[in-house]
Image (cartoon, rainbow, N blue to C red):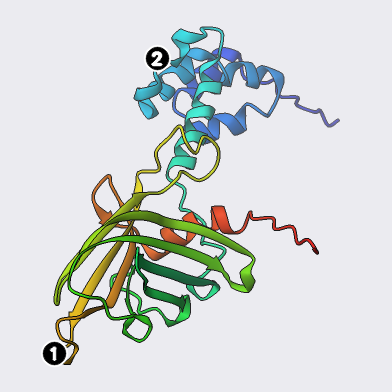
Amino acid sequence: MATSCVRSPPPWEVLVLVSRHLDPKTLAIASCVSKSWSSSMSSDHLWKPIFTTHFPSLSTLQLAKPTVPYRRLFAIGRYAANRRHQNPSRPNISLGDLVFVITISTTKSHVVATAKPGNELLVDPHGLFRFDIDVSGESNWVSEGLEGVKITWNVVLKGWKGVFTMMECEGTVGFVGGGEGWFSEELPRPGCCLNAVASAIVAELKVGMWSGKERDGNVMVKKVSVGVMSIVDWRYVSVEDGLRYLQHFLLTCNIVETTI
């Protein structure tokens, strides 16, 4: 006569003893077996050392609300850590989607007016968001001397679907052959609280002059260099980081066309 052998579940003392040697992932899986296993595998005396070992900087969180279980605190810490170290997604726009529009003018006349498609820009060999633009073909001659100038740098999304002003500032430039002029302007933070929190990045623009001997001392702007720099380490951001920043402003533009 055959007899069936029904195995009783291990006592909770054994479960607790075994659970001390399990990693967090195995503990979480084991807690789904049954109610008794869930109770044994979710106790604070198991998860407290795991939580404080993995996230010592968060060990004081339970002081704010002692009723929060350590298993829950571990899950919160794990999620925050994964988000912190998550690789950013690739930007949804490319340089080829952009047009750089730069104008430089004095109180007397326009000095430079250029619109340079992004696919015509010479990309930095290190992949930095910094570009040298030859504007000698769009530049007018200016008399040597100190002049007040107004500079604007706009980035336009192709098809005129959006525009973002990188820089609009006034200053003084010494127009002299071989001279340079530097301008910078802090950029707004993408998202909410634009005026309350600094972005920690600036738009930078450099003007390079050239003189012609046959021009009786007159000079012209031959090159304009533009870029985006982090003021945390004073380095230019990468092209991808620059594009990620710009898409916050360019891809959310809703332009309403009206007929007059």
The residue at the point 57 percent across, 19 percent down is 42
Residue type, label 2 = Thr
The residue at the point 58 percent across, 30 percent down is 28
- Residue placed most toward the observer, 45 or 196: 196
Looking at the image, is 173 positioned above or below residue 111? Answer: above
Q: Quadrant of residue 215?
A: bottom left
First of labels 2, 1 by sequence position: 2
Q: Seen in the image, is 256 located left or right of residue 44? A: right
In the rendered image, residue 43, in percent from the top left (x then y), is placed at 55, 15
Q: Quadrant of residue 178?
A: bottom left
Say which element carries label 2: loop
In the rendered image, residue 229, in percent from the top left (x then y), is placed at 31, 55
In the rendered image, residue 255, in percent from the top left (x then y), is placed at 70, 58
- Mark 2 vs mark 1, foreground winner is 1
Task: Find disc 2 in the rendering and name its residue.
Answer: 60
Looking at the image, is 172 positioned above or below residue 212? Answer: above
Q: Seen in the image, is 252 located left or right of residue 245? A: right
In the rendered image, residue 249, in percent from the top left (x then y), is placed at 56, 54
Answer yes or no: do the residues labelled 2 and 1 have beta carbons within 8 Å? no
Disc 2 to disc 1, C-alpha distance: 72 Å
For label 2, the crowd category at 10 Å Cα-Cα, with few meaning under 14, some 14 to 19 and many 20 or more, is few
The residue at the point 45 percent across, 32 percent down is 196
Residue type, label 1 = Lys
Looking at the image, is 90 positioned above or below residue 159? Answer: above
Determine the residue located farthest toward the bottom in the rendered image.
214
Instruction: Tell me the quarter of the image containing the C terminus.
Output: bottom right
Q: Seen in the image, is 51 located left or right of residue 191? A: left
For label 1, the crowd category at 10 Å Cα-Cα, with few meaning under 14, some 14 to 19 and many 20 or more, is few
- Residue placed most toward the observer, 73 or 236: 236
- Residue placed most toward the observer, 137 or 32: 137
Task: Find disc 1 in the rendering and name its residue.
Answer: 213
The residue at the point 78 percent across, 61 percent down is 258
